[in-house]
Amino acid sequence: DLFQYGVEVADGWAGWAGFRVLFPLNEPERMDEAASFLGASYFRLLGPGHVYGLSARGIAVDTTGEREEEFPDFREFWLVRPQPGDRTLTFWGLLDGPSLTGAYRFRLAPHGHRDLDGLGNAEVSVVEVEAHLFARRDVARLGVAPLTSMFLFDENRGRDFDDVRPRVHDSDGLLMLTRSGEWIWRPLSNGPGLRVSSLRDVDPRGFGLLQRERRFDRYLDLEARYHDRPSLWVEPLDEGWGGGGVELVEIPTDSEFLDNVVAYWAPDEPFRAGEERSYRYRLVSFDHRLPEPILGPLVEELEAEVRPGRVIRYRHGWDTLPGEADPPPRSRRRFVVDFEAPQGPGGQGGATGSTSVTPPAATTPAGTLPEIRLQASAGQVEGARVEPLPERSGGWRVTFALDPGESPADMRLFLTRDGLPITETWSYLWIPDHD
C-alpha cells in the first residue's frame, strides 16, 4: 500500500513472489540481472560475465539430523530507494519460519564495491549481510550463511554417465580458510549415498563453494554455460562465530536439475528457544580466484609472504596396469593430485581457465622437491611421491596408492618447505566400493 506497480491485479492473485535487481554488469547501456530474491530464503548473486548457478540462503534449519528440515521464508522486504549515481542498494528482509524468525539487512554492490568500506575496487559483486535471529523453539542444527549448488559428475565419475559432456556441475569444490591460516580445498562428489562432513574450526576466516574450472572445453555445453557459473565466498565480518564447522552435505542425484550440495557454518551450540543470535558476513560472487581486494587483507592478517599453491586437478582410478596378470582388488586406488606453485602478492599464475602465466614468487631450489604431508583416517597409504609438473608456471604432482580396507578414508594432503605449508590442503573422502 506504499507504492504502485502500475499493473492490474487479477482476482485470486497470490501476491508477489520476490524481486530482482537490475544493473549494467557487462555493458554500460544494458541492464543485467545482478541479484534475485525468490522462493523461501533463497537468493542469487551475479558478477560480470556470470550466468545463474548456485544459490545462497538466509538460513538453514535442521538440514541434517533426525528432524525434518525447515525452509523459512522471507515474508517481507523493505527497499531504500537509491539516489541517482548510487552504486549500492540497501534493503531489509523479515525471515519467518516455524522454529525461528529473523531481521536481515542487506547492502548490495553489483559490479565492484568502491562504496563498501576498505575494499577498494574489483570486478565482482558483493552483498553485506547482517542477520539477527530469534529462536521460537529449539533448533538442533543451525546453518549460517548457507550455500546451495549442484554437482552431477566430473572426469572422475564421467564413465558412470552416458553423456557427451565431460563435466556437469555448478560448483566443483568447497574452499575454506581457517582461523589458523590453513586453506582447505575439498572436491565435491556425487554418491555413493548421502555424505555429511565437517571441517572444524573456531571463528573461521571464510568459506565458499567455487566453480574453479572455467574452460569451455572442460564442459562442452553451450546452453548451460557451466564454465560461466559463479563462485560464492562467505567472509565473516566479526569474530563471534565461535566453535563449530563448515558442514558439507552431498546428496546423490542422477539429474542436473536438482540441487544436491549444501554448505554452511554449523555452530556447536544448539539454538535454544528464547535465544537471540547475530551474524555479520560478506558474500562475494567471483570467478575462480578470490579477487585481490578480498584476498589481500586475509593474507596480510596471516602475515603470509606467499599465497599457497592451489589444487589444480585430481584424478583417481584402479591401481593397476591394463592387462596386468594378477591385479589387486578394485578397492585399491591410485590418486593423482596436482598443485600450483605458491605465488607472491598479486600473483595469478597457473589459474584454471586462464591463459596468462606468471612465474611463481617462491621458486624451488634447483634439484630439490617439497615435502609431502599426507594423512588418511583409515586404510594404508603406499608409494607417495612428488614430481615437478611440466607447466611453465611450475607446480608439482603427488601420486600415491590407497588400500582403504572396509572403512571410508578421509584424506589430507599438502606440500611443505622448511616445515611450512606452501600449498592448499587437498581434503577428500574415499568410500570403498565407490566404483
Image (cartoon, grey):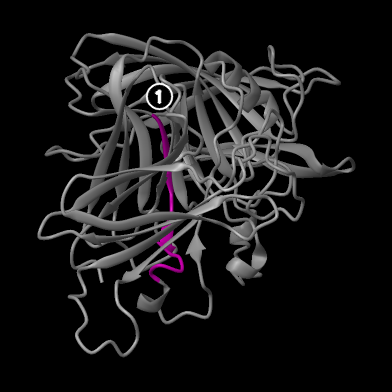
Q: Secondary structure at mark 1?
A: strand
Give x and y (percent) for residue 12: 46, 45
Foreground residue among 192 and 6: 192
Q: Is residue 154 magenta?
A: yes
Foreground residue among 271 and 74: 271
Quadrant assignment, res 154? bottom left
Give the labeled residue for mark 1: 95
Give x and y (percent) for residue 106: 57, 21
At 42% across and 82% down in the image, what residue appears? 162
Quadrant assignment, res 355? bottom right
Is 30 left, or right, of 245 in this rendering?
right
Query: Residue extending furthest front?
Result: 367
Q: How many marks?
A: 1
The reply to whether residue 403 is visible in this rendering is yes
At 34% across and 70% down in the image, what residue appears? 317
Q: Main secondary structure of the magenta part?
A: strand
In this view, 342 is above or below 339: above
Looking at the rendering, the stretch of residues picked out in magenta corresponds to 145-157
